[in-house]
Image (cartoon, helix red, strand yellow):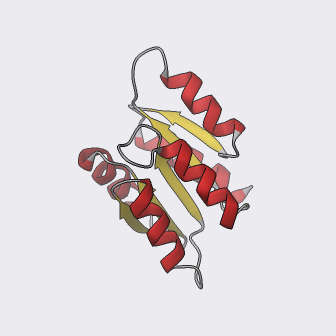
Amino acid sequence: MKAILVVDDDEDSRDYISTILIRAGYEVTTAIDGDAGMDVVHARASRPFDLIISDIFMPGRDGIEFLGGLRQYYPDLPVIAVTGGYTGVKRPYADSMTAMGAAQSLLKPFTPAELLAAVTAVLEA
């Protein structure tokens, strides 16, 4: 079973993404922000995640800082960036995450089919 970490400060978003992934047969762990996400990633160093799905706009360590820190220790760990950020800046921030090494980016709201298509594409790459 593939293991996926979902990092998002919004509980509804975490639950939405997690539910879709669990129903699709993935093992899911969640974190409330980039700091907690990094702690979870380091705690699983002996059995790394197969994929991380991270929000961009979060308090504390946001998605961009999280991805930057993640790349220092785990340069090949695939990441899908998601954002429901502010109108007009969603796409530029999502594009910046992709430029920093995120495999894909999704703009909220997205459908279960869109999420699963992105996850499948990244895991099969």
Residue nearest the observer in this picture, 63 or 49: 63
In the rendered image, the quadrant that contains the C terminus is: bottom right
Instruction: Please say if 92 is above or below 58.
Output: above
Residue 57: x %, y % from top left: 41, 37
Query: In the image shown, does 13 or 40 lie closer to the viewer?
Result: 40
Q: Residue at x 63, y 30 (%)?
A: 95
Image spot of residue 48 (x, y percent): 59, 75
Residue lying furthest front in this view?
60
Residue at the extreme left: 12
Which quarter of the figure has residue 75?
bottom right
Residue 119: image location, x then y, percent: 57, 52
**One can see residue 74 in this view:** no
Q: Residue at x 53, y 52 (%)?
A: 66
**Image point (42%, 34%), residue name:** 110
Left or right relative to 76: residue 84: left
Tell me: residue 114, above or below residue 122: above
Q: Residue furthest top?
A: 88
x 48%, y 79%: residue: 43
